[in-house]
Amino acid sequence: MISRRTFLASTATTLLAALLASAPATAQERKTIRFLHNETDPPSIEFFNNAIAEFEAANPNIHVEMETADNDGRFQKILASANTRTLPDVIKVITLENYEFVRRGFVSPLDDVVDSIGRDDFVPEALTKIDGKVYAIPYTMGNNSNLYYRTDMFKAAGLEVPKTLDEMLVAAQKLNTGGNYGFIFPASNNRASTLFFSALMWSNGGTYFDKDLNVTFDSEATVKTLNYIRDLAKTAPEAIGSYSFGDIINGYLSGKAAMVLALPRLASALGANAPQLLADTGMASIPPGASGAGIKMVSTDGYAVASEKFGGKNQAEAKKFVEFLMTGDRPAKFALTAFPHLIPTLRSVQESSIEQGAKLIGGREDMARTAFNVSNSLDFSNEAGARIVDGKLEVSGTVNPYIGAIIARQVPAQVVQRVVFEGEDPAEAAKWGQEEMIRIVNELKG
Amino acid sequence: MSFAASTGAEQRSMIDVHHLAGRIMVYLLAFTAASVMGFPLVWMLICSFKPPAELIMSPPTFLPHEWTLANYRDLFVQTRFMSYFANSLIVASGSTAFSLVIGGLGAYSVSRFNIRATRLFSRFSLIAYMLPEVLLVIPLYFFLVKAGLADTLLALIIANTAFTLPLTIWFMRAYFAAIPVTLEESAMIDGCTRLQALWKVVVPLAVPGLISVGVFAFNSAWNDFLFALVFTSSERNKTLPLGLSTWIGQDYIYSWGMLLAAAVLITLPVLAFYLLVQRKLIAGLAEGGVKGG
C-alpha cells in the first residue's frame, strides 16, 4: 500500500520531469530558426514536417522549429512577438498585412531570394513590391471568385451557364425553388463578406480608391452592386448574416444550393466528401459585370523573414529555408496537400501540379484550370485606380497603405449588412461607407 | 365515516395531489433542462461515429447509417492529439496543485491572522481577479520572455495559477473561517506545529471546499486558450484547445469528424472528474455559500 506522502512525492517528480522535458530546445552548436504559419490541414503539416527533415539533413547546422496557429491566432502571435522583439524567423504573411509590417520594420527585403528562385518564373500577379522591394516570397494564391453551379439543376430548368452577373441573378431567382436556394453567399460582418462584395464591385467597374488614393467608394458601381446583392439575398438562406467561408462550402456540400462563389477549397472538399455532387457540379470564373469583365478577388500568401531588430537573428539561415521550400519538387508537393485550393505561384509548377492533382478531384482538370486562372484579378493592396479597358484589367501600380485598416474594420461588410438586413437605401449606404473610409484615412494620416 | 374524518382525509388527499403535482413539475423542468443542455453533447457523440459524407447530408440523419471509428483513428494518426492531451493534463494538473497549495495556505493565513495587511491583501486579490485575461496576456508575456520561460508548459502553469489564485483564496478563506480555531489549538496543545495542525485537523474538514476550488482551477486551465496561444509556440508544447483551434480558424474545417472525435475525447476526462467528485463538490459549494465571510 503506497502512503500518501510517497504518492504525492512521486506525482510531483513526474510533473517536474515533464515540465523540464517541455523546455525549449537550446541552440547547442546548431542554429534554430522558428517558422510560423497557419497551413494546418494535416496533409500540409505532414508536408512541412518532411520538408523540414530534408532541410535539416542537408543542413546539419540548422534546426527548424515549426509553429502553427489558425489565421487569427497567427496574426495575434506576430503582434505579441513583435512587441517583445521575438518574432519567429520565418512567418507566413498575407499581402494586405505585409504593408503594415514593412512600415513598422518587422520584415526584411527578400529580392535576393526571389532572384535565386527565379524572378521570371513567378506568376506576375503574385509578386508585390513595396517601395520597390519584395518583402514576402509568395508561395500560394487564393482565388475567391470561382462560380460553382449545379449542372443537374441548370439542365432540369433549361438554363445555360451564366455569362454575365445579370444572368447569374436571373438563374438564382429561377432556381430558388423546391427547397433549394438559388445562391449562397456570406453577408456577415467579416472578411468573407468583404471579399464577396469586392469582387462584384470591381466587376461592375468600381474601386475603393483611385490612383491618387482618394476614396471612390460612393460610386454608381457600388450602388449597382448593393442593389444586386439585395436582390440576390432573396434567393439565399436567412442565416447568411452569420456565414463565413466554411458555411458557404458546407452549404453547397449539403446539396441545397444551386450556385456559390467560393474558393477552390470547395472543389477539394467535393472530391474528398461528396464525389456524387462533384459529378453534378460545374465551375467557371466569376461572370463579367457592368465593366465588361469578371474581376476575381485573388489573395496571395507569402513567407516573410523577420528583421534583425524584431527578433530575426538568423537571417541567412531563414532565407535559405525559404528558398528551400520554394525550389525542387516541394512547391508542387505542397500544392497537392489541398488541391486545387493552394495555387502555386511558380509557372513551372502549375502545369505539373494540375496533371498530378486532377485525380484528387475525380479527374476534373477543368476545375483545376479554372481555379488556377488568376488573370483579371485584384487584391486590396493593388486595386486603387484599377480600370477595365476592352474587357481587360489595367492596374495603376499604386500600392494602397490605407485599405488594410478599412478592411480590418469590416467597413464594406457593414455596408452590405445595412442594405440586406436593415433595409437601408443602397445610395445612402454607399455614402455612409464613403464617409467612414475617409474618416479612417484621415485618422491614419494623422 | 364522520364528517370531520372525511374532511381531514380529503385535505390529506389534496395535499398529496399538490405534492405529486409539484414533484412532476420539478422532474419535467429538470428533464427539459437536461435535454436542452445534454442534447448537444449527445449529438456530438453520435456524430463522431459518422463518416464524412453522412455528416454533410441534408436532412441530417440522427443515428449513423454506417458506424465508424475512422474519425478517431484519423485523429490519432494525422494529428498530435495525444501530445496536446498530455500537455493539457500537465498544465491543468500543475496549476490545480499550485492553486490548492498556494491558495490554501494563503486563505488559511488570511482567515487566521486577522491583521490589516491580510485584510488588505484579500481585498486586493479580489480586485485583481476582476482584471480580464486579455489585459494581462501581453505584460505577462513580456515577463515570461525575460524570465526565459517562453514556450514552456511551466509558463502556462504559472499563468493559469495566477489567474485562479484570487478566487481560490477568497473562497477558501470563508471555508477556513468557519472551522473553529479551538480544534487547531487543541492539536497544538497536543504537540502539533501550526502546519501539522493545518494538515491533520483543518484540511480534512475543508476537503469539500478544496475539491470545489480544485474543480474550478482544473476546468479553467483545461479550457484555457489565450495564454496557450500567446505563451507557447512550438507544436510539442501545444495544448488541446489551441491544437483544435488551428482547424476551426481556417477557411474550412478540414474534417468535422475528427473535430467531433476530439471534442468527445476532451469532454470525457472533465466529465469523469465531475462524476467522481460530484458529492463533495455539491457539499463544498453549498457549505461555502452559507459559511460566514
Image (cartoon, coloured by chain):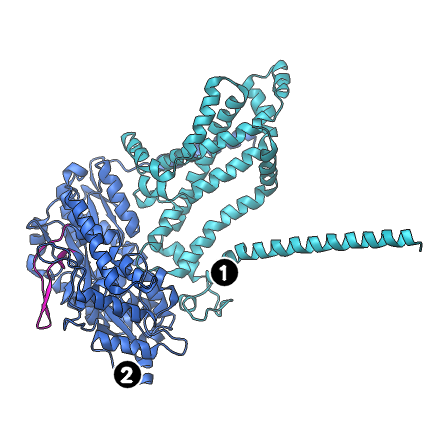
Relative image position of residue B140 (x, y in whole percent):
32, 33
Q: Nearer the viewer, residue B184 or A288?
A: A288
Q: Considering only vertical position in the picture, is A325 above or below A389?
A: above
Residue appearing at x 19%, y 62% in the figure = A298
What is the span of residues highlighted in magenta in the rendered image?
A381-401
- Image quadrant holding the C terminus of chain B, namely top right
Of B289 and B247, the residue lying toward us: B289
Q: Which residue is label 2 attached to?
A: A159
Residue at mark 1 = B43
Membership of B243 in magenta stretch: no
Quadrant including the N terminus of chain B: bottom right
- State the cyan chain: B
Residue contact at pointers 1 and 2, CB within 8 angstroms: no
Task: Note the chain letter of the blue one.
Answer: A
The vertical placement of A249 against B135, above or below, is: below
Which chain letter goes with mark 2? A
